[in-house]
Amino acid sequence: MKTKTLLAALALTLTPAIASAECAFGQHKQAASCQAGSTWDAEKGACVAQPTG
């Protein structure tokens, strides 16, 4: 009985650590798609009109 309790406690203790490790390795960034004549502004986090000239 003690072995089962110990294993259950160990599994419950390690679950959050395993879940957070998966989130850290699962981060992906998607390229922004702007309309023609616009470009992505990383500071604003939005598409802005592309300067001409």
Image (spheres, rainbow, N blue to C red):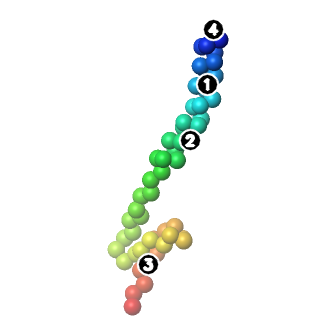
* Quadrant in the picture for the N terminus: top right
Q: Name the outermost residue toward the front.
A: 3
How far is mark 1 from mark 2, CA to CA? 16 Å
Which image quadrant is residue 50 in? bottom left
Mark 1 or mark 2, which is nearer to you? 1
Disc 1 + disc 2, Cβ < 8 Å: no
Mark 2 or mark 4, which is nearer to you? 4
How far is mark 2 from mark 4, CA to CA? 30 Å
How far is mark 3 from mark 1, CA to CA? 55 Å
Mark 2 or mark 3, which is nearer to you? 2
Q: Is residue 9 left or right of residue 26?
A: right
Q: Which dot marks residue 10?
A: 1
The residue carrying pointer 2 sits among few (fewer than 14), some (14 to 19) or many (20 or more) residues within 10 Å by Cα, namely: few
Q: Name the outermost residue toward the left.
A: 36
Report how many numbered discs are placed on residues in the image: 4
Residue corresponding to mark 2: 20
